[in-house]
Amino acid sequence: MSADGSTAGRADRVRAVLARLARFTWRTLRGEWQAVVVDPVGLLARRGLSGLSLAFVAAFGVVFFHDVAQHPTGAWWVERLGGVKADLPLWLSLLRTPVSLYVPALDLPVWAGITQLFLAFALAELALGRARTLALAHGTTLAGTLAARLMIALGPGWWGFGLPPECGKVLDTGPSAAVVGLFTYLAVVRRAPVVFTLTGGSMVWESVAVPNLAGREHLIAVGVSIVLGLLHGRRERLRSFVRSWPVARTTEPAPAEAAPVPVPAHPDRPRSAHPAPEAALTALEHRAGGVPGADVSRW
């Protein structure tokens, strides 16, 4: 075979691989556009602005707490209502966590995050519903808060997982964990690799580039959302799997068998109020004088 033929064969294979890759990329992007943009817009057209009520409330809450925190008295109240730190008692942190989701972080521009917040809650509300969106947002925020307390309790030296005690005094607020969790969950459920790369991948890169408390919590939110997204729609399978487990049964002693009741060989016949015909005939013969064949009809 000539060198020109081998070169042409390799070029054909490369072109075939590139064409296959281009078709796969086009199908993936088209499916992601349909799932992430077209379907939610269609739902919004049917529901109207009421389908974005949760997104409006979340954005308004962040703006409200941001404006209140600009005054000294307001900042005191915002910290008492939604200020979460790892050195606080656990019950107090759990009580403040729902409000801390709407308290913006002090070191991040609030207006830059409003767009991401509104978009994340809007897409999730249209695709998942209000109840699941709220549960996922608060669940990822709570998971990050509890993980931060665990990392600080472990301390440094646990293969980079632990954190020094000084991180317990850092104010841990903001909706960033909820936003990352919602985007990641939607990317897993809707099979959207581009959205996943822009959200989950960026959080991984942020935690590697700037290893701080917020980056660790974002990683926890991404991990929790991935697990929940993989379990989405598998409720019936999980129920059937749990039901199929063998149930341990306690062995109970067998009941003792009753002793057999002896049956007589010739059981007594039940007595009747009227005598048998043979007995009545014998009695009549006896009254006739014991003469067999006597006429007993007159008796």
Image (spheres, rainbow, N blue to C red):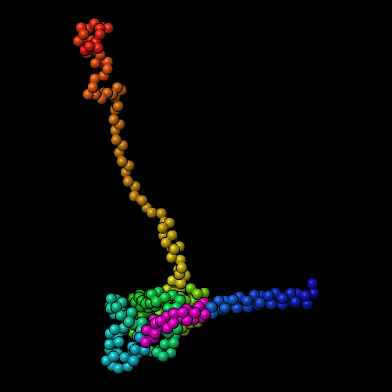
Residue appearing at x 68%, y 75% in the figure: 16
- Residue 267, image x, y percentages: 28, 24
Residue found at the very far front of the displayed protein = 298
The image quadrant of residue 113 is bottom left
Q: Name the side, left or right, on which 114 lies relative to 71.
A: right
**Residue 15: image x %, image y %?**
69, 77
Residue at 34%, 82% in the rendered image: 100
Q: Can you see residue 179?
A: no
Asked which quadrant contains residue 138, the reply is bottom left
Inspect the magenta stretch and tell me whether residue 51 lies in it. Answer: yes
Whole-percent x and y of residue 96? 30, 80
From the viewer's side, name the closer residue of 15 and 59: 59
Residue 258 higher or lower than 108, as above or below: above
Q: Which residue is painted at 30% across and 38% down in the image?
A: 256
Q: In the orientation shown, which residue stands out farthest toward the top?
A: 291
Q: Residue 95 vs residue 18: left or right? A: left
Q: Relative to the observer, which residue lies in front, 68 or 281?
A: 281
> Which quarter shows the C terminus?
top left
Image quarter of residue 117 = bottom left
User: Considering the image in quadrants, where does the N terminus appear?
Assistant: bottom right
The segment highlighted magenta reads 35-60
* Image position of 34 (left or right of 151): right
Image point (22%, 24%), residue name: 273
Q: Position of residue 41 (x, y in %)?
A: 49, 81
Answer whether residue 213 is magenta in the image: no
Total labels: the figure holds: 0
Q: Would you say residue 39 is visible in this rendering?
A: yes
Q: Looking at the image, which is closer to me, 43 or 95?
A: 43
Is the magenta region chiefly helix, strand or loop?
A: helix
